[in-house]
Amino acid sequence: MILVSGAILIPLSHIDRAVFSGPAEDPAAGLGSATGSATEAPGLQGRPPESSPQNGAGQACGPFPQFPDETCTGWQHTGVSLRECPKKVTEPGVTLDGCRFVGGLEIGAAGVTITRSRVEGLVQPRGDLQDLQLIDVEIDGTGHVDPARGDSQLAIGSENYTCIRCHIHDTGRGANLGRNVQIEDSYLHGFPYMDGKHMTAIGSNGGSNFTIRHNRLECDVSGCSAALSLYGDFAPVSEVLVEHNLFNTTGSYCTYAGSVDGKPYPNGTNVRYLDNRFGKKFSDTCGQYGPVTSWSGGNGNQWQGNSWQDGSGSVNP
């Protein structure tokens, strides 16, 4: 994991107050130089780093049982000034820092790293992202989502990528999981209304090798199914770690846990839910019908330490 020093508190509403500035600051130590064909265009500027009662000066998101929000995810808390960068990245192994990608981000090479940046649109392609790493990145779908096409307009997915301290919002859905995905210290929420689209903050239709650790996951419109859904539609759900997350939804359940009856691959294997918290932000039962469904014991699956956020007891499948 790469940590960027200088965390600050900036409410998301302050994006409207962001000022246009000149070129980006030099990348923080440890991030390397910003390379590629970025243009010196006007960009958005975060506030200078300052002390935070919640996170402390120079720290990222507070440790569990605190949970990420907009004050410690995305680019604003780093204090970086953004410049506009070309939306298509074609140089293998490049690191781009302090970029504003207008109209989305298209990954056309392996091993790309994006740090302290803002994506205005969606990350493409939907498929193999070739070991893409996003660190302190905001993905904002505002104005780029057609409600009639909601399912195809997820923020990012679905194979071979990492998202650390990402702030994902106002996209058709959040993040999709296919193979080899890590999402950590991130905040996914605020999806627009798309009735019948089976929306989730994070979802999978089958696959393996997922790590979903210390995130705040919310889905709160009537098109939502869950905060986290693991469905065996196109492949078995296997080798999954879900740890230290906070779930809230207006959907049916806060999580579908990988073994969904009636799916082509109904049995999840080596699916571990460890020390997660189930919230009551939208319902006293987390989801409309309960906190969890589609859990199966055995097959290496593990359910341990999961409880209500308010301290009212354990959550059992």
Image (tube, rainbow, N blue to C red):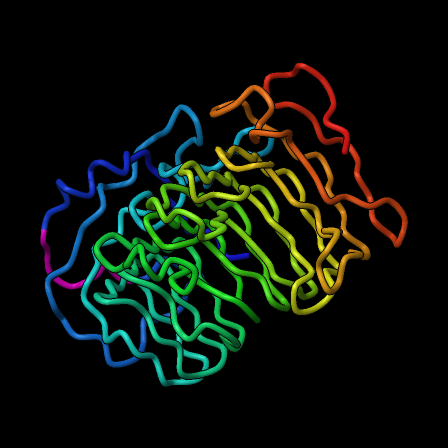
Label the magenta part by its dominant secondary structure: loop
- Residue at left offset 45%, top offset 80%: 93
Q: Is residue 48 left or right of residue 223?
A: left
Quadrant in the rendering for residue 51? top left
Vertical placement of residue 33 versus 169, above or below: below
- Residue at left offset 35%, top offset 54%: 171
Magenta stretch, residue numbers: 20-26
Give residue 13's position: percent from left, percent from top. Answer: 22, 36
Give residue 108's position: percent from left, percent from top. Answer: 40, 83
Vertical placement of residue 61 versus 40, above or below: above
- Residue at left offset 79%, top offset 35%: 304
- Residue at left offset 56%, top offset 19%: 284
Residue 29 among magenta residues: no
Vertical placement of residue 3 versus 280, above or below: below
Q: Is residue 281 left or right of residue 209?
A: left
User: Looking at the image, which is closer to me, 130 or 20?
Assistant: 130
Give residue 22's position: percent from left, percent from top. Answer: 11, 60
Vertical placement of residue 202 versus 124, above or below: above
User: Looking at the image, which is closer to me, 37 or 172?
Assistant: 172
